[in-house]
Image (cartoon, grey):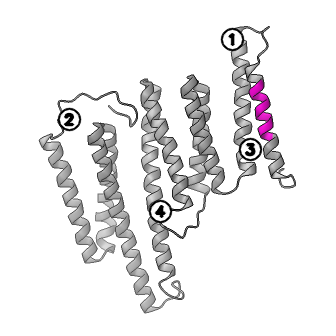
Amino acid sequence: MYEGINKTATAWFALALAGVYIGFSRRAAPRYGESAQQAIRLLHLGLAIAFITIAIPIRLDAHWITIGWLVQAGFLLWLGDRIHSDLLNAFAVGALVLGVARLVVFDNFVTTTLIFNTRMMTYAVAIAVLGGVAWMGGKRGDAIGGFAADVASIALNVLALIALSREAAAFYSRQIAQAGPNPLRWNPAVSGRVRSIQIMRDFTYSALWMAYGAVLMIVGFWRRSAFVRWQALVLIAFTIGKVFVYDVSELDRGYRIVSFMVLGVLLLAISFVYQRDWLRLAKSKPAAAPGLGQR
């Protein structure tokens, strides 16, 4: 429907409609009862947010659509917290789901630099909004807020792992492309270099996930959050499975030895902390601090 229409004009028209409905939401007819006025306000506010959400993909392109939805989610989340509106919080969650789904499934980034690129910028915006959800959910102190904080905490860590893993994959893909005139064509020398790069890539995945798990474990100890520590343990267990099932058979002997050494040191450190109870976790009671789903 929008193929033959000026995108800029259509987007501004959608925003103008949103402004009209925002005006309607603030001027409900006084002849209606209080409950009816509140329902009319919420209906018009919902229509306004829907038109704003529609205007973003009409006017923007590529990853800017994702960023627009994520920024909208962050603004609605902040506004919903300020005026204590569950409706705005629900719309914020909807915009956040749209942005994260597009980021993970549809957005296709072409990057030439490591870390400092549009992909990491977009993921950073998504992680920041999810962090806001976790913090505000924990601040509410009720069951719904706690559940939202837990889900946001898990989604935040998953997105961070996906972002770092994709950065590593893109880095080694560039290395493979530079390995020879045609890496896809069989050539003993080129194939050997490509194979070496692929081994380094697989080792980097394991090291990256293990390091992230260790950092997550430190955060869990620091915040005294069993929920965060369980996330770290699940990630570390998954990485251990990858090391034993895949890395042992695919990696060279040197990388294999380093993998087992790092893994052993990390597991020993975690077991000593738990066994000796250096942080007095057994005697401490969980604090009702905001975010990160504390128990």
Task: Identify the amino acid type marked 1.
Answer: Ser
Q: Rounded to the nearest whole Å, what is the CA distance between mark 1 and mark 4?
A: 51 Å
Where is residue 68 shown, x and y percent of the image?
A: 64, 47
User: Regarding mark 2 in the picture, which secondary structure is present there?
Assistant: loop
List the residue tagged with mark 4.
115
Look at discs 3 and 4 and give the one toward the viewer: 4
**Where is residue 277, by image quadrant?**
top left
List the residue tagged with mark 3.
55
- Answer above or below: position of 197 versus 19: below
Q: Rounded to the nearest whole Å, what is the CA distance between mark 1 and mark 2?
A: 49 Å
List the residue tagged with mark 1.
35
Q: Rounded to the nearest whole Å, what is the CA distance between mark 4 and mark 2?
A: 36 Å
Query: Could you tell me which residue is drawn at 34 percent across and 54 percent down?
Result: 212
Task: Identify the amino acid type marked 4.
Answer: Ile
Q: Rounded to the nearest whole Å, what is the CA distance between mark 3 and mark 4?
A: 30 Å
Asked whether, in this view, residue 160 is left or right of residue 76, the answer is left
Query: Was residue 72 drawn as part of the magenta stretch in this picture?
Result: no
Segment tinted magenta in the rendering? 14-23
Query: Could you tell me which residue is drawn at 21 percent across and 30 percent down?
Result: 284
Query: Between 209 and 178, which is closer to the camera in this rendering?
Result: 178
Q: Residue furthest right?
A: 4
Disc assigned to residue 281: 2
